[in-house]
Image: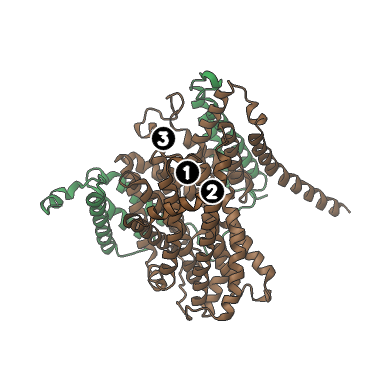
Chain colours: A brown, B green
Amino acid sequence: MDTLNALLHGFSVALTPMNLLWGFIGVTVGTAVGVLPGVGPALTVAMLLPLTVKLDPTGALIMFAGIYYGAMFGGSTTTILLNTPGESASIATALEGNKMAKRGRAGPALATAAIGSFVAGSIATILLTLLAPLVVEVALKFGPAEYFALMVFAFTTVAAVLGSSTARGLASLFIGLLFGLVGIDGQTGAPRFAFDVPELLDGIDVVVLAVGLFAVGEALYMAAYTSRLPETLEKMSGSLWMSKDDWRRSWPAWLRATAIGFPFGTIPAGGAEIPTFLSYSVEKKLARNPEEFGNGAIEGVAGPEAANNASATGVLVPLLTLGIPTSATAAILLGAFQNYGIQPGPLLFQSQTDLVWGLIASLYVGNVLLLILNLPLVGIWVKVLAIPRPMLYAGILVFATLGAYSLHQSWVDLLTLYIFGLLGFAMRRFDIPVAPAIIGLILGPIAETQFRRALAISEGDATVFFTQPISAAFLAVTALLVVVPWVLRRRRRAKTADQTAL
Amino acid sequence: MRQDAAEIALSLGVLGLGVFAAVVTATLSGEGGYAGIGPNFIPAVVSAGLLVTGGWLLWEALAGGWRNRGAPEAGTEHAFHAGAFWWITAGLAAHMALIGWAGFIVAGAVLFACVARGFGSTRAARDAALGFALSLAVFLFFVKMLNVNLPAGWLEPLLGSAGI
């Protein structure tokens, strides 16, 4: 009952005209950046972070959250019509969506993506509403040791377990952690890695790192390796209405995808890529006519698009209740909270009820707005896709430099931005994941604080991390996650070696 | 056995970053109070992490190349286009140099034109005009609506006499 009251109070915050306006701006901008290839929600929120100085926290965070899940809606349009995934979370959609468009069924593909996103987003928001207070109950018992162990778990899964290479994931994480060390040590006030440069004493801002890696790095990469390729845009074709058969095949896929996507969002699994692919393969397995997969099966669009929205909402559970970001965008959202001096975590639900419940209520509102924005108005977004690539990237870089420059009004930040751009270019080219670096930058300093606090409480006794049951459990799970796949791989290799010996 | 010079260079870069971090860490205080560890402890851990992963990457690069590197789909990439890369770099460098004295709008127009050129646009005058219009709109929105401080530079007298 408490939850219901809190949620009703949240609606009274989210439905004030100003907050409705911020929510509307957020989902509109989110849809636009989702549609545009090359601009993702992480980059957009990072570019807009300097605005936090001017806005009140509730409105700003409602807008940022709107951008985040709005991008999940918009991404499908690009993927279906252009065969270039608008977002990494839409790669699985590209497999069937573009095939449907080629066969003149772009309309139903866009419709099942939009309605599926709405259904999954709304169910996931209900789950978030019910789950968050329970997690808060548990999290209130956490001390510094537990938090530190939880962060080690998050670092490990994001960097080492997921992704194509443990070595490259860890390299990215440690680079991010190193950047996080730059500035004044929060415990003793001693400067570290700053070399008396005033811009560095403030620490490396997540805006500069994220915008450098995503915008400048991406622009350099796209220009150098793809700008001379021809583009093909599929025509919007076919009625937007789904046939009875389309509905019958879509809705079970939406529900299954929600069940897959939401839990994946809540654990540190590096965003929406894994659940979307998982949903795709589940739909392929369960399909009555699997031979249709690869030629435009509607289940293959309905599932992944629903899954990425469910996981986007799931990501908010650990972010709001524990302060743990599980994707690059979530890390930047955490940066937005920090700009206001607010630390997400269980106490947020007691000290900032307006903010947190207003934000959750805005998700319900936002999903409705997005359905309206994406279904009847899809024609407008198709026009956005027609912006020529040179203009698009030129515009992105004007905004990117604006975000970095407005931090200190200094060209030093612009130089740092370019250096991070070169880093992003190399990471993109050599398949090094970016999310661990951003999570390391944001979460690293918090993890260090918790680590030193835990040791200060135990008076320097490092066994505290292993004697507290919750902390020990997190560390044990982390160790298992690292060791088990490694052992399995060795055994498999030994087996194949045996077979070749025979 | 496949060896990629760029992979080796990047691995050495990570190792070098680790060495650099370790050298700086050595200058930090270890004074720790109750916790028993000081501001140098985590930097030491991070330095070690960079050295280990750098070494690991170098070993992979020398022994058959980095593992599981996703190859781009056929037809989605062309060979490295140096001109495109340098036009964008030049645009950002010019922007850095111009923004302080020429102002946000002029710097933005130059950046816009250079980036568009890098992406293969051949109509420099139109691009510069578009960039000027976009930067002006952004400038007015941020300065007037949001009170963000951006340099007007050369256009200050113009914007000033227009009452902006």
Residue at image point 69% right, 38% down: A476
Viewport quadrant of the C terminus of chain A: bottom right
Q: Are marks 2 and 1 in contact (CB under 8 Å)?
A: yes
Q: Which of marks 3 and 2 is in front?
A: 2
Q: In this view, does A468 lie above or below B84?
A: above
Pointer 2: what residue?
A132
Q: Which sits earlier in the primary sequence, circle 3 or circle 2? A: 2
Query: Which of the 4 quarters of the picture holds residue B10?
Result: top right
Pointer 3: what residue?
A203
Q: Residue A359 carries which label?
A: none
Q: Evaluate whether residue A496 shows in this view.
A: yes
Q: How crowded is mark 1: few (under 14 residues within 10 Å), some or many (20 or more)?
A: some
Mark 3 and mark 2, same subunit? yes
Q: Is mark 2 on a helix, strand or loop?
A: helix
Q: How crowded is mark 3: few (under 14 residues within 10 Å), some or many (20 or more)?
A: many
Q: Is residue B157 above or below residue A366?
A: above
Q: Is mark 3 on a helix, strand or loop?
A: loop
Q: Which sits earlier in the primary sequence, circle 2 or circle 1? A: 2
Q: How far is the residue under mark 2 from the one under mark 1?
A: 9 Å
Front-lying residue, A169 or B79: A169
Q: Where is residue A315 in the image (x, y as percent from the top left)?
A: 53, 51
Q: Residue furthest left?
A: B161
